[in-house]
Amino acid sequence: EDEINEMVQAAVLSNRAACWAKVGHFEASKDDAHRALELRPNWGRAWSRIGLASAKMGQGNEAIDAYKKAVSFDPSSANVDALASVVRQLNGPNTDLAHAEKENGNTAMRGHEFGLAVACYTVALVLVPPEAIASVPEGVAPEDEHALLRSVLFSNRASAFCRLKSWQSARADAQLAVEKKGDFVKARNRLGTALLAC
């Protein structure tokens, strides 16, 4: 019964945090979300409330950390999109950091922390420089110098989504991995796995 009461109290605090954020009281929102986390420390929704409040208060690094935890505990598309948006707002393209986040994701996969892996691969994807659209002759596809990295990251995130049994997200990422580098065999294997499960 105490556990149920704590869950209800955490939900009330998290919902109130959302209400505070709606009316622009981000400090109060963050306080209530932190109180919810005292009761349920692994609750993605409360972490996402902290991410939103921190972002609105200009606390970028704290927002990224909170959204990474939100994705780690609840790798929903809303949390993944929010993390990507905050990282995009705060960071420019950086291939070295993208590779570092990829390695963090690989470490998380080896440790069976699949939500954390999704978060790391998401950050890495945002940090990869955008595809350069070069002037090429008609009928010739422009070449993306980061196509392999982009494909590996989508493929790895698809693998993490597969381990979480989030088949639609896995399929979407695997399809993007194949689009970015059609001859990357792992991407095709992951797409096949996701399609079989859907």
Image (cartoon, helix red, strand yellow):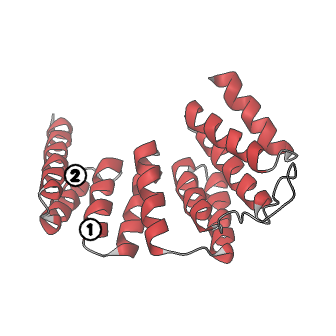
The part of the image, by quadrant, that contains residue 25 is bottom left
**Residue drawn 65% across the image and 61% down it:** 107
**Residue 175 appears left or right of 181:** left
Q: Residue furthest front?
A: 138
Which quadrant, please, contains the C terminus? Answer: top right
Horizontal and vertical percent for residue 41?
Answer: 31, 54
The part of the image, by quadrant, that contains residue 144 is bottom right
Q: From the viewer's perspective, is residue 60 above or below residue 78?
A: below
Q: Nearer the viewer, residue 38 or 178?
A: 178
- Label of residue 39 in the image: 2
Q: From the viewer's perspective, is residue 172 above or below residue 56?
A: above
Q: Name the front one of labels 2 and 1.
A: 1
Alpha-carbon neighbours of circle 1 within 10 Å: few (<14), some, or many (≥20)?
some
Alpha-carbon neighbours of circle 2 within 10 Å: few (<14), some, or many (≥20)?
some
* Three-letter code for the amino acid on which mark 2 is drawn: Leu
**Residue 84 appears left or right of 157:** left
Horizontal and vertical percent for residue 84?
Answer: 48, 59
**Residue 41 appears left or right of 133:** left
- The Cα–Cα distance between marks 2 and 1, rounded to whole angstroms, is 24 Å
- Label of residue 56 in the image: 1
Q: Earlier in the sequence, mark 2 or mark 1?
A: 2
**Residue drawn 76% across the image and 64% down it:** 146
**Residue drawn 16% across the image and 60% down it:** 29
On the question of residue 68 being in view, the answer is no
Horizontal and vertical percent for residue 178?
Answer: 77, 43
- Label of residue 11 in the image: none
Horizontal and vertical percent for residue 185?
Answer: 86, 43
On the question of residue 10 being in view, the answer is yes
* Three-letter code for the amino acid on which mark 1 is drawn: Lys
Q: From the viewer's perspective, is residue 2 above or below residue 14?
A: above
Which quadrant, please, contains the N terminus? Answer: top left
**Residue drawn 69% across the image and 26% down it:** 195
